[in-house]
């Protein structure tokens, strides 16, 4: 779950309601890509309807107070494959179950547009980079909505698809994916990704590793070594994990800071809590190191 800075673009509205669902913030450029070049081939839409659909999104963005969701719905009626409108509608959903429907539609449109019927490794170049940024952002939102609503296997498929296509993992999908492997007891899959990205020293990667080792054997030397590594990258996580439900998100926290630890707890705390005694063990063991 990346800590990348949220850019002010069509998905992040300066005066809009922040998205409350658990999700990552994928790296992306400011502004709206040229939608005309992205029209899905299976959808025939007139130039006038496409222009109006895009204009409605801009009108929605320009509203200073409150947001008229009817503008997004009208944009979708004019151009059913306007994935921007679908994704924005998800951002402004009150319930996760509702957001899931809108993100799923946005994701399906872009997924078909980029991959068609076959997923393959692709490179980021000027021709596809902008579109991939949008795809990464929407895949991110959709997958984390799946994760937060308990659709773990569906979330795994989305995370895997993007990582397999872009092994350098610019959207940092490996962290939630590896957590899901632990939850679903897909231990061989976890080990595969661990070996691929073992040089990652982020708080997310190292505390994921610690959880994996804990579930293997809490008292092993490898678990103690993993605890040492995790505490070195951020010593505040054990304290913040004890109150993960009250954690508040922070923009661009410093590495190793209490704010970074609180972000981690807010994103991962409830999943650690699914393993009886894991958080209590983490706090007790970390106190021994002080």
Image (cartoon, rainbow, N blue to C red):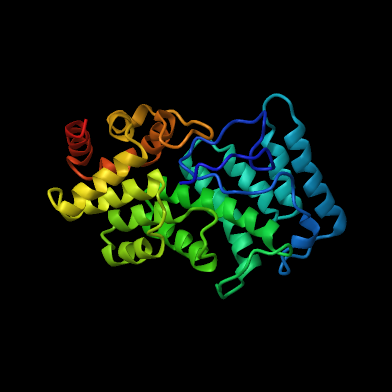
Q: Toward the viewer: 147 or 78?
A: 147
Q: Is residue 222 left or right of residue 150?
A: left
Residue drawn at x 58%, y 39% is: 5
Residue 283, horizontal then vertical, whole percent: 22, 33
Residue drawn at x 46%, y 59% is: 159
Residue drawn at x 36%, y 41% is: 233
Residue 197, horizontal then vertical, whole percent: 41, 60
Q: Is residue 83 left or right of residue 3?
A: right
Residue 149 in view in this figure: no
Rendered view: 272 above or below 114: above
**Residue positioned most to the right:** 48
Rendered view: 235 above or below 77: above
Q: Toward the viewer: 107 or 276?
A: 276
Say which quadrant the C terminus sits in.
top left
Residue 262 in view in this figure: yes
Q: Is residue 198 left or right of residue 6?
A: left
Figure disc tally: 0
Rendered view: 46 above or below 275: below
């Amino acid at each position: 779950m990346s800590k990348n800075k949220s850019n002010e673009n069509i998905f992040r509205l300066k005066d809009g309601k922040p998205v409350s669902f658990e999700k990552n913030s994928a790296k992306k450029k400011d502004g709206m890509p040229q939608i005309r070049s992205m029209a899905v081939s299976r959808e025939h839409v007139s130039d006038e309807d496409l222009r109006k659909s895009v204009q409605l999104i801009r009108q929605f963005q320009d509203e200073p107070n409150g947001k008229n969701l009817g503008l997004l719905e009208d944009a979708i009626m004019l151009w059913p494959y306007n994935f921007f409108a679908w994704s924005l509608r998800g951002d402004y959903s009150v319930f996760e179950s509702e957001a899931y429907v809108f993100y799923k539609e946005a994701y399906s449109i872009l997924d078909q547009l980029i991959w068609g019927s076959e997923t393959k490794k692709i490179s980021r170049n000027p021709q596809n980079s902008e579109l991939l940024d949008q795809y990464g952002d929407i895949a991110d939102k959709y997958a984390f909505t799946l994760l937060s609503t308990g659709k773990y296997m569906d979330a795994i498929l989305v995370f895997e698809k993007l990582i397999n296509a872009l092994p350098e993992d610019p959207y940092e999908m490996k962290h939630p994916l590896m957590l899901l492997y632990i939850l679903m007891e897909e231990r061989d899959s976890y080990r595969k990704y661990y070996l691929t990205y073992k040089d990652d020293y982020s708080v997310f990667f190292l505390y994921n590793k610690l959880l994996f080792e804990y579930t293997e054997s809490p008292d092993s030397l490898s678990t103690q070594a993993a605890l040492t590594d995790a505490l070195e990258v951020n010593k505040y996580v054990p304290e913040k994990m004890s109150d993960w439900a009250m954690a508040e998100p922070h923009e661009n926290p410093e590495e190793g800071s209490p704010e970074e630890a609180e972000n981690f707890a807010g994103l991962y705390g409830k999943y650690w809590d699914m393993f009886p005694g894991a958080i209590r063990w983490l706090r007790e063991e970390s106190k021994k190191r002080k």
